[in-house]
Image (cartoon, coloured by chain):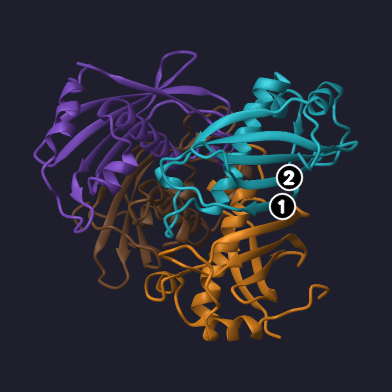
Chain colours: A purple, B brown, C orange, D cyan
Amino acid sequence: MATYETEIRVRFGDIDRAGIVYYPRISHYCHVALEEFFRDRVGIPYHEVIDGRRLGFPAVHLEADYRERLEFGERARVRIDILRIGRSSHVTRYRILREKTGNVCVETRITTACVDMETFRPVPLPDDIRAVLEAHLADEST
Amino acid sequence: MATYETEIRVRFGDIDRAGIVYYPRISHYCHVALEEFFRDRVGIPYHEVIDGRRLGFPAVHLEADYRERLEFGERARVRIDILRIGRSSHVTRYRILREKTGNVCVETRITTACVDMETFRPVPLPDDIRAVLEAHLADEST
Amino acid sequence: MATYETEIRVRFGDIDRAGIVYYPRISHYCHVALEEFFRDRVGIPYHEVIDGRRLGFPAVHLEADYRERLEFGERARVRIDILRIGRSSHVTRYRILREKTGNVCVETRITTACVDMETFRPVPLPDDIRAVLEAHLADEST
Amino acid sequence: MATYETEIRVRFGDIDRAGIVYYPRISHYCHVALEEFFRDRVGIPYHEVIDGRRLGFPAVHLEADYRERLEFGERARVRIDILRIGRSSHVTRYRILREKTGNVCVETRITTACVDMETFRPVPLPDDIRAVLEAHLADEST
């Protein structure tokens, strides 16, 4: 039951008028972490998945809990694991942990479909990607 | 039971590598619609809520269903109504309707807390803002 | 000697950690204005220029003077005119005028090439687009 | 004559409808590199410069040459050096080098003022920051 982590840093331009991370940027952090996950764990850079394999992984459902605000200059870790795997969809959990305290500031669960980039229709998850996702399966309670 | 609508247009820079709107931008569209809602319905520009009233409305929970993809150049409407109102929090529903078809492409439900901008602690919704929210209450099934 | 103007509004998420518009967002405002210019003056939505005509207009040179800062909630106008037209390139001037004072807060001059979207190589400006650009030619001193 | 370099990676969401990096994102890359420069060379995280020292460094003039396009998944280096230092302003050059070829894809020169964050008025560059900038002075021809 592997877990993947990558580091992000809160940038000057990520901050909104209220002085904290603009919450749409949190979803961007998750996508950046996903790109790193593909490179490091799936072993295929995400752009090659799109261009070479002609597969896309659009979000179809998203749930997020924003528990603690993130501020400029902070370092955080995005921890990725997989909560469910279907025929062509799967649920990825992203937990953003503040480096200083280890607290989970944000938890996001994203259901993505695996689609053919020409037709945008769902296709079965390829075996190699499915195997990597399975290796990162976690229990929701952990 | 009022509903609020504002128009958005999908911009060149909103598009991602897969050729559709980068999904974090959808949350940005919702926030832009919220800013318009405050100006038009609450009657206080959102920056004066922050600066003058010293109130903020950070997202604490978000759920989104991405049903149809949005493409560059499209015009869409963001329809806002309110699903629940608590003491200091409320749930806003944002439905993004494609202009050409009227289809709901994305539905997002965001729970926001009303917080004091100095302390970031929840405070009761002020009466004037609560009254406007109540005027926009809708049934989840509609 | 026509001038084109379109309105923009400074958004909550456009603000940076220093409380003013994050300057890369200024270039985004210019691009949004360009998209409106194509729709309103060239008569071809910019996405059809790309998809139908297979032409792109990448920036090759940019100069910007940031004279006054823009703040959240402000309304501004982007005024577009054309300073020079070559065989395949042209220089567009974008002046961002604060609504309240009429002051030019930012002036940006962007040289764009007209390129074939397949090859990314310069091609001559098509006659219809050239004619519209010529109608908006202005003297740099105005 | 020190030079500073930091790595960036072109992200999925940085790409525009033409399939290349949306050029306002290039300025964001430069700002991210500046934040790293402050941390690594000035020795003060940029947010502490703002919050603790109450200094800001807004862009007042920017010039950029976009020579080669950047694509999704690419790794690049941002090389920073200083071209001129005045009493309260200085010119930073950012060159974005493609990792694969070493080519300078974009060169940006940004004049920033050193301002008091309360008044947004220019103040002299503090001695410690000036010393670091001087250590990174370069000749424009190099």
Q: Residue furthest left?
A: A87
Question: Which residue is located at x 15 percent, y 25 percent?
Answer: A134
Quarter the C terminus of chain A occupies: top left
Are discs 1 and 2 less than 8 Å apart at CB? yes
**x and y, in percent, of residue A21 in the image:** 51, 35
Q: Chain of mark 1?
A: D
**x and y, in percent, of residue A25 in the image:** 45, 39
Report the front residue among D58 and C129: C129
How crowded pointer 1 is (Cα within 10 Å; few <14, some 14-19, many 20+) is rated as some
Residue at image mark 1: D63
Per the model, the C-alpha gap separating discs 1 and 2 is 7 Å
In the image, what residue type sits under mark 1?
Answer: Glu
**Disc sitting over residue C45 in the figure:** none
Picture quadrant where residue B5 is located: bottom left
Residue at image mark 2: D110
Question: Which residue is located at x 48 percent, y 82 percent?
Answer: C43
Identify the mark nearer the N-term, 1 or 2: 1
